[in-house]
Amino acid sequence: MKMLAKLGSLMGLSALLSACGSLPEQLATTNENVTAQYQLVVDAAKGTEVRLGGVIDTVKNLPDQTRIEIVNLPIDKYGKPDIDQEPNGRFIAYVDGFVDPVTYSRGRLITVGGNKDGVERGKVGEFEADFPVIQAYGQYLWRVEERLIINRHTSAFSTCWGYYCDDFYYGPTQGRVIKEVK
């Protein structure tokens, strides 16, 4: 009985840990040679399987597909865009069917998997550039979670030292916001 409990605990723990860091199933592929670096995608041949991520700039629904213009951010091995890095370049993703522009709104983080389908000439303001085009087989919208950590400094002259006490602190409280992509 003890052995069964240990085995069940071990299986539960491994399932929990595997869920924390894995590629979303919408982006999964059997190809081990997926190109996931922007500069390599720019230079890649048509038909190359790619995975890129970034921030949505514009969404335009066409009759049979949706055009999503994305500002590129580097992604990690799980496909998560790295919000601590500077954007470098843009790309266009074509998704079959309709996607709601409210759900796929400007500023949302997205990762797209698909095949490179050439380049498309476009503009950012008045600047013209060539953007890599991806015919997407899957896309995943990420959310950014924020945690606030407040640094509390308890005075030596405090009247309360318990867990539920909040000192009458005169002056600004310091803390930091931690942003995490999930």
Image: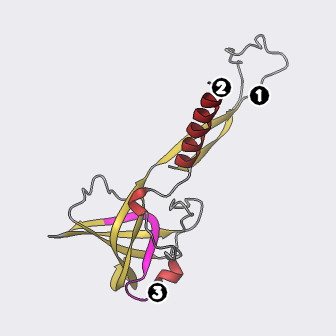
Residue on which the image places disc 3: 44
Indicate the amino acid at tag 1: His
Q: Residue furthest right?
A: 156
Residue closer to the observer: 171 or 24? 24
Circle 3 packing at 10 Å, graded few (<14), some (14-19), many (20+), is: some
Main SS category, magenta section: strand
Indicate the amino acid at tag 2: Lys
Drawn side of residue 137 relative to residue 9, left or right: left
Indicate the amino acid at tag 3: Ala
Residue closer to the observer: 3 or 60? 3
Residue in the picture at 64% in, 36% down: 149
Q: Is residue 164 above or below residue 74?
A: above
Q: Nearer the viewer, mark 2 or mark 3?
A: 2
Could you say whether the residue bearing mark 3 is in a helix, strand or loop?
A: loop
Residue on which the image places disc 2: 2
* Residue 37 on image: x %, y %: 53, 75
Q: Nearer the viewer, mark 1 or mark 3?
A: 3
Residue on which the image places disc 1: 153
* Residue 69 on image: x %, y %: 35, 70
> Marks 2/3: CA distance?
55 Å
Residue segment shown in magenta: 45-58
Residue in the picture at 17% in, 70% down: 64
